[in-house]
Amino acid sequence: MGNGHLYILWTSGDPVTAEKMVFMYAINSLKKKWWDKVTLVVWGAAAQLAGQDAKIQKKLKEAQKVGVHVAACKACADQLGVTEVLENLGVEVIYWGGPLTEVLKKGEKLLTI
């Protein structure tokens, strides 16, 4: 059965939280095989932080390198003017309202930060 799929909903604009919780846990979850798959959903203030902070962008690339799937809320990214930057970083930028609702309705593992 494996270790399953973890979704991390990252909404905090705090860089310390991003570095010392979100990315630390997402990266180690795959490296240490705590989870089979990790999807990081970048939403709200986190999209702005990821679109503007070089140190956070470096952590984002590190997470992608170990296999974390990174996706961002298109509505947030568009409104905050960071869609192009996120897409250039290899982030999947899509509308997340529907997919998040499905994650919740299916009882998937969701960590919100």
Image: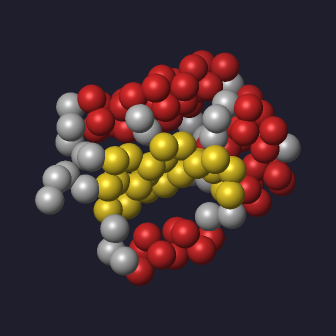
| Residue at far left of view | 1
Residue 51 is at least partly visible in this image = no
In the rendered image, the vertical position of residue 4 relative to residue 12, given as above or below: below
Residue 66 appears in the rendering: yes
Seen at 46% across and 26% down, the residue is 65
**Between 21 and 87, which is closer to the camera in this rendering?**
87
Query: In the picture provided, is 1 more to the left or to the right than 18?
Result: left
- Answer with the quarter of the image where residue 90 lies: top right
Q: Which of 86 and 53 is in front in this view?
A: 86
Residue positioned 58% across, 48% down in the render: 71
Residue 86 x, y percent position in the rendering: 71, 37
Quadrant placement of the N terminus: bottom left
Horizontal and vertical percent position of residue 28: 29, 31
Q: Which colour scheme is used?
A: secondary structure
Q: Quadrant of residue 96?
A: bottom right
- Compared across the picture, whether 31 is left or right of 73 comes to left
Residue shown at 41% from the left, 35% from the top:
67
**Residue extending furthest front?**
1
Measured along the vertical axis of the image, is residue 106 above or below residue 94? below
- How far across and down, in percent of the image, does residue 85 sit? 77, 33
Q: Which residue is drawn at 67% across and 31% down?
A: 89
- Comparing 17 with 100, the one in front is 100
Residue closest to the far bottom: 105
Q: Is residue 76 above or below residue 45?
A: below
Question: Percent from the top left, x then y, of residue 37?
Answer: 34, 47
